[in-house]
Amino acid sequence: MNLLAKRMHGEVPAPEIVGRLTGSLRTVRPSVIRSRHGIGLTGALAGPGTVWNEVREAMRALNVIDFVASTREAIVQSTAGPKVHCAGIDCGREEGYAAITVVPHEDGLHASGYYAESLADYAGQGIALLNRNFRDGPHDDLGRHPRLRLVCPAGEQMGLLIDGEPFDGAEEEEFELGTCEVDLVTTKEFET
């Protein structure tokens, strides 16, 4: 489930990756996300929907009680928490999103806005979670940008995950496209 391993080696099991590591190693300096918090190799997630990270961790731990409690809290935060907006560019819903993902690609930061407004949206998000990929849940494509500024117009701090790790988000966060400053080993053709 490691996103960096998938980015560098594809969606293959670890033994296959190890088997590919013969001869001279191929390296790449992929695009990354730069922010005031540091570098993101695989992506960032901003908004009240970051609380779904706790649901994911409860699923990983196979803790049913924590899973139920964190799912309930995630639904409340996703619907009632202060939404996040793209600022300075025309992208997405005027009312904002429960979560916005930012993923680095060679040609820009790809943004997607996630929402849950109806019972069907919650069902879609639940199915995506059960499949262990919330990114398949209901969302809008917000395009690719060299720089992206996300704001919480309510003036509250936004939830923030970078490469799956929690950070204290401010009411405004800026992300820009950069290049990794070190070589990373890859066993596949590098794609945008």
Image: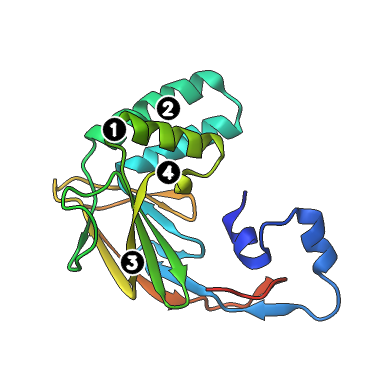
Asked if residue 121 lies left or right of residue 189, the reply is left
- Expressed as whole percent of the image width and height from the top left, the position of residue 150 reads 25, 59
Label 1, residues with CA under 10 Å away: few <14, some 14-19, many ≥20? few
Please tell me whether mark 1 or mark 3 is closer to you in this view.
Answer: 1
Location of residue 156 by image quarter: top left
In the rendering, which numbered label is found on residue 137? 4
In the rendering, which numbered label is found on residue 118? 1
Say which residue label 3 marks. Answer: 143
Label 1 sits on what residue type? Answer: Ser
Nearer-the-camera pick, 50 or 9 = 9
Label 2, residues with CA under 10 Å away: few <14, some 14-19, many ≥20? many
**Residue at 29%, 43% in the rendered image:** 98
Real-space Cα separation, disc 1 to disc 4, in angstroms: 13 Å
**Residue at 67%, 78% in the rendered image:** 27
Real-space Cα separation, disc 2 to disc 3, in angstroms: 30 Å
Real-space Cα separation, disc 4 to disc 2, in angstroms: 18 Å
Real-space Cα separation, disc 1 to disc 3, in angstroms: 24 Å
Q: Earlier in the sequence, mark 1 or mark 4?
A: 1
Say which residue label 2 marks. Answer: 70
Nearer-the-camera pick, 125 or 20 = 125
Label 4 sits on what residue type? Answer: Gly
